[in-house]
């Protein structure tokens, strides 16, 4: 039985006081229930302060990016061990904003995935197609390439301790959510791709949906068989809105 994971990707938003207020609001309102986990991914400078406020709450901490290198002369980069050191359990790798705006190739994303795992972090591997790729019927090919690069580099067994997030680029920050059926089709495809190599791993891996997930569409998405949670951007920036999604997960 896969737990539902509701993850907030705060992206490059907030401030020191704002992130503390947000996390305090989330911790104060965690819904009762079993079978779901909550995770917040603040910007790097706020990780340590948020970690302190999360202590004992059960809400988990992740980062939004990580270097593929362990240490050394990489100005401006953050090593996996540093994230672990400040209390992160998860890290997002291969978000479409990084692939598109910072030229992160699938090979580099695979290297980040591996170095994160080697440091004891759980990577959240983001995959997803653009609108033109969807319209050209390339959704599965795009996702297969992004997923395949990591499977080839790390092996399918690496997904025993990893999470996948399907984030159609056209749905991110646009208010255009994939329908539960559209999302389920891709989630099922991802699971089938992994199952061709290892059915047990495929059955166990959490596959999150991301792209304009909100309180009023979360229940429909989370009800789908292969959707195991959400990676939420805009709607994770207000505690009450994020908690509404958590409540949908708690009643799932
Ligand atoms: P939005 O929820 O703002 O569409 O962002 C989704 C996302 O990119 C999460 O990583």
Image: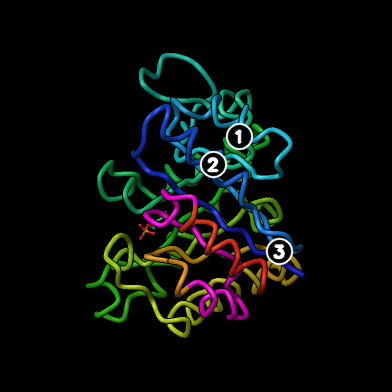
If the image is split into quadrants, where does the C terminus sit? bottom right
Q: Is 201 contained in the magenta span?
A: no
Residue identifier under label 1: 88
Q: Earlier in the sequence, mark 3 or mark 1?
A: 3
Look at the image and give the residue range highlighted in magenta: 218-239
User: Is residue 139 shown left or right of residue 38?
Assistant: left
Q: Nearer the viewer, mark 2 or mark 1?
A: 1
Q: Are marks 2 and 1 in contact (CB under 8 Å)?
A: yes
Which quadrant contains ligand 1? bottom left
Dot 1 falls on a residue whose secondary structure is: loop
The extreme left residue here reads 132
Q: Position of residue 20 (x, y in %)?
A: 49, 32
Query: Is disc 3 placed on a helix, strand or loop?
Result: loop
- Identify the residue shown where x is 64% and y is 74%: 196
Gap between marks 3 and 1 measured at Cα? 19 Å
* Residue 218 locus on image (x, y percent): 50, 71
- Mark 2 closeness class: few <14, some 14–19, many ≥20 residues within 10 Å: many
Residue pictured at 45% horizontal, 38% vertical: 65
Quadrant containing the N terminus is: bottom right
Q: Along the line of sight, which residue is nearer the eye, 3 or 121?
A: 3
Q: Report the residue marked by disc 3.
A: 3
Say whether mark 3 is within 8 Å of ligand 1: no
**Residue 217 versus residue 33 in the image, above or below:** below
Q: CA distance from mark 2 to mark 1?
A: 7 Å
Task: Give how far across and how far down residue 151 sits, in percent.
Answer: 57, 56
Residue matched to label 2: 91
């Amino acid at each position: 039985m896969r737990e539902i994971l509701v993850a907030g990707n705060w992206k490059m938003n907030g401030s020191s006081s704002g992130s503390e207020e947000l996390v305090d609001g989330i911790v104060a309102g965690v819904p009762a229930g079993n079978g779901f986990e909550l995770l917040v991914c603040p910007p790097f400078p706020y990780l340590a302060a948020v970690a302190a406020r999360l202590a004992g709450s059960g809400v988990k901490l992740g980062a939004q990016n990580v270097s593929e290198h362990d240490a050394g002369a990489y100005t401006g980069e953050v090593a996996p061990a540093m994230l672990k050191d400040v209390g992160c359990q998860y890290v997002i790798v291969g978000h479409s904003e990084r692939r598109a705006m910072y030229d992160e190739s699938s090979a580099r994303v695979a290297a980040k995935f591996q170095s994160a795992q080697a440091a004891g972090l759980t990577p959240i591997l983001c995959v997803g197609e653009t609108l033109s790729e969807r319209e050209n019927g390339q959704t599965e090919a795009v996702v297969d390439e992004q997923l395949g690069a990591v499977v080839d580099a790390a092996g399918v067994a690496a997904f025993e301790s990893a999470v996948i997030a399907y984030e159609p680029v056209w749905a991110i920050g646009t208010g255009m959510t994939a329908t539960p059926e559209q999302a389920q089709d891709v989630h099922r495809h991802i699971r089938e791709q992994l199952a061709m190599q290892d059915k047990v791993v495929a059955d166990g891996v959490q596959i999150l949906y991301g792209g304009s997930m909100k309180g009023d569409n979360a229940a429909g998405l989370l009800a789908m068989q292969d959707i195991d949670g959400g990676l939420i951007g805009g709607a994770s920036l207000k505690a009450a809105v994020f908690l509404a999604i958590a409540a949908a997960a708690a009643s799932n």
